[in-house]
Image (cartoon, helix red, strand yellow):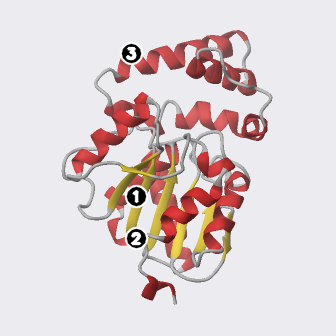
Amino acid sequence: MELRYHSTGDGPPILLIHGGAEDATMLTPQAEALAARGWRAIWYDRRGTGASTRENWPDTGADQHADDAAALLRELGVPPATILGFSSGGVVALALAARHPEMATEVIAWEPAALSMLPDAAQLRAALHTPYEEHLRHHPGDWIGAYHVVLRTLSEGRADLSSPIVKAAEANAEAMLRDDGPLITARTFASGELPAGKVTVAVSEAPDPLHRAIAERIAALTGTRPVTVDGARHHEVYLDAPLILAGFLQHRVPAPERT
């Protein structure tokens, strides 16, 4: 198994874990913004995505990716690190906290897409999955078309399928539909599974109701509340406004550690 990774900057290490229909190239501006503020940013293509390979994939979803991330940190000799996961990558970050707490100084899950944490998860998942599964039944292998169906379903038909983010994400449509949707977002977390004092769930100023509900349920497991990031206007802020989260992270690390 080979994970394609990148590293830039000096200082405390921070590992970035991309979300569904994303890859490392899409996180480069966020990584560079963090490096400019004193971090050593490390970011990579998850197994099955981008330039990383696909052995035994997809398998156990978030747990498989959490083990991969921990192995990457060990290979680079940089643990423990701050772990920052976005959307479904936030679910992977939480799984890493649960399975490899010694590898993390802090885990920050940005609006984690742990859909199965919600009480009506079965109905929600069916409403999301059925349209794109039907599309694939009629158009086998049309991952991009099925991804567009997902976007239209989530946005109730308002998705801009010509946006730069959507066009970049199309390269990762298969990984999203085979791994993120059915497996990663199905990961649940139990009381006592997440290490106390290490996990922060962060949200935008006006999160989608589903993201808010998931964030509150996960944060409650550690006896905390979700942290609102000032200036973060929407879920994909890490893709189109990297200075927002870079500023947020900069102020979470005491100055003496950044010398």
Graded by Cα atoms within 10 Å as few (under 14), some (14 to 19) or many (20 or more), the crowding at tag 3 reads few
Dot 1 and dot 3 residues touching (CB under 8 Å): no
Q: Quadrant of residue 60?
A: top left
134 or 149: nearer the eye? 149
166 or 189: nearer the eye? 166
Q: List the residue tagged with mark 3.
A: 123
The mark that comes first in sequence, 1 or 3, is 1
In 3D space, how far apart are the residues under numbered discs 1 and 3 (Cα atoms)? 27 Å
Dot 2 and dot 1 residues touching (CB under 8 Å): yes
x then y, percent, for residue 70 = 47, 65
Where disc 3 sits, the SS reads helix
Q: Which amino acid type corresponds to the residue marked 3 in the rendered image?
A: Gln
Q: List the residue tagged with mark 2.
A: 103
Lateral position of residue 100 relative to residue 48, left or right: left
Q: List the residue tagged with mark 1.
A: 96
In 3D space, how far apart are the residues under numbered discs 3 and 2 (Cα atoms)? 35 Å
Dot 3 and dot 2 residues touching (CB under 8 Å): no
Residue at horizontal 68%, vertical 48%? Answer: 240
x then y, percent, for residue 184 = 47, 39
Graded by Cα atoms within 10 Å as few (under 14), some (14 to 19) or many (20 or more), the crowding at tag 2 reads many
